[in-house]
Amino acid sequence: MEGVMSEQTFTATIEKDQRIEPRDWMPDGYRKTMIRQIAQHAHSEIIGMQPEGAWITRAPSLRRKAILLAKVQDEAGHGLYLYSAAETLGADRGDLTRRLIEGRQKYSSIFNYPTLSFADVGVIGWLVDGAAICNQVPLCRSSYGPYARAMIRICKEESFHQRQGYELLMTMMRGTEAQREMVQDAVNRWWWPSLMMFGPPDAESPNTAQSMAWKIKRHTNDELRQRFVDMSVPQAEALGVTLPDPDLRWNDDRGHHDFGAIDWSELKRVISGDGPMNTERIANRRRADEEGAWVREAAAAHAGKRAAT
Amino acid sequence: MSFDDAYQALTDHDDDARWAYGTGFSDPLAGVPTALPEGVDGADLAAYCLMIGDDALILSHRLQQWVTRAPELEDEMAIANIALDLLGQARLLLTRAGEAEGAGRDEDELAYLREPGDFRNVLLTERVDADFGHLIARLLVFSTWRLALLDHLSASRDPVLAAIGAKGVKEVSYHRDYAAGWTVRLGDGTDLSHQRMQAAIDAVWPFLDELFETHDVDARLAGVAVDPASLRAEFDAVLAQVLSAATLEMPKAVEAATSKGRDGAHGEELNEILAELQGLARATPGGVW
């Protein structure tokens, strides 16, 4: 009887567009879906520190170094809020990290591409963070309260990052011819992977319907992808770069840009572990975890001694 | 801000408030007079700013190398934060060095275009960390020394150095607390962590004496610079307290390495740092970033 009442309360809360909080009753499927979604997001923040983090020591001016260091630090902070949000659902941070390292949980495939020049730092800010914002802004209204609140803070910081990335590209485009070529090359490499960040087409997205009903997800993958394309085109024009898609053009009838077919076989390849950097990203995370084990054990031992006295 | 159009903020060029850095960056030295104080030799002041500026720049670089390698996320954030504070101090000091020198060099020319022999950092800052214990031991020693130094510097006759000192005290107090906290946890943790922390403290000890040697530049800048020899007693007292709480032994006095980092004599490790720090900037002449 209590279960029925609880389920009614849960459904009514969702229907009224109110938030589910950690102590509220929720269906097991909802709990599992939320843990998976938040953990994947947290893992993406932590793995996402690597491609840009690799440029901190090599940043070509002290101002850019400070901006990049602060950005990568923000990503660690996002990972921390998100793991904490997952812990409100009964998950454990150490366990989630093990799942990541063992390949049992995913992270965003975008981070399996290499960062080949400093222009990549700018393009990641502009396109990758831009796509992330398109995906994440609706999550500020996610039905799970702790996640929605974490997303508000994360979206604010992501919008700084995006703007910093775009400003770096604007500066580089006003520099030497070699710098302009670096920017165009980076745009060529990151454009299609950015479009893939919105996930498979709606027709092939198995979880979308349930997630929309639970108000975990607010827009479909294809809707968000279209929004991203429409917003990026004028940005590219203002920057003076060409987006690498010969089929990209405004469609007056639809009121949107048409764009070329996405190579989904590549996305599948990268997701299933054959991207250029999958092995290295996980190996780095594993190494940090293993090399830090003695430190975490020492902290636990010390805390135990303190508690005993 | 409206969350539904965060992305459109890119075309919104009049809104400095949204920038974490960049156009809305506030100058921590705003309003501080930058003229050289009377009787101060510009070349000496520039040399002094490079000494304590390079310390911060080079140790920040070593800490940057830890990003994505920390044992726990909280430490990832703390180490990046400390690296960022030291980078900020380096930028202010290098900028001041350029002003005092009067040859038109800015922070980037000084960071990216000097040769290893022109760097003035102490050797302690350039070493590679063998493990997290070494990171902590070095940071404990460095931040204890630098906190005392910045505290005295806040009374410098040079208003810029005084402002940098006052700002830095708040930052480095946290660095010292962080390092002391981990020294205690590792020293009084497991047997393994105790051994490693003791080994790390022993490893930094030969590099201490250089921190407290009075250089000719320090001596000529009395009242402007801080005489590092005057910081030893405070340093020793803090270290004794932290090591005791950590159940670690104070290393016996060792024969000091003949360190002359302040005169530009460095190890190979500085060359490795500079290759990484300067490589891209030097490979793109005329580039704007």
Image: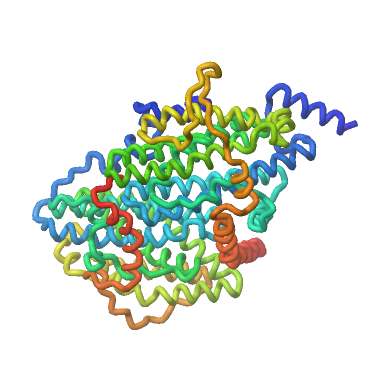
Q: Is residue A112 above or below residue B10?
A: below
Q: For residue B72, what is the image quadrant?
A: bottom right
Task: Pinpoint residue A262: horizontal percent, then vertical percent.
Answer: 57, 37
Task: Pinpoint residue B154: horizontal percent, then vertical percent.
Answer: 27, 53
Q: Is residue A122 above or below residue B39?
A: above
Q: Nearer the viewer, residue B235 or B98?
A: B98
Image point (52%, 59%), residue name: B70
Is residue B27 visible in the rendered image? The answer is: yes
**Left or right relative to B49: residue A207:** right
Residue extending farthest to the left is B39
Q: Nearer the viewer, residue A134 or B30?
A: A134
Image point (49%, 27%), residue name: A230
**Left or right relative to A22: residue B29:** left
Residue extending farthest to the right is A1
Residue extending farthest to the bottom is B255
Q: For residue B225, what is the image quadrant?
A: bottom left
Q: Nearer the viewer, residue B166 or B256?
A: B256
Image point (58%, 47%), residue name: A109
Task: Pinpoint residue A264: horizontal percent, then vertical percent.
Answer: 61, 41
Which corner quadrant holds the N terminus of chain A?
top right
Name the colouring of the figure.
rainbow
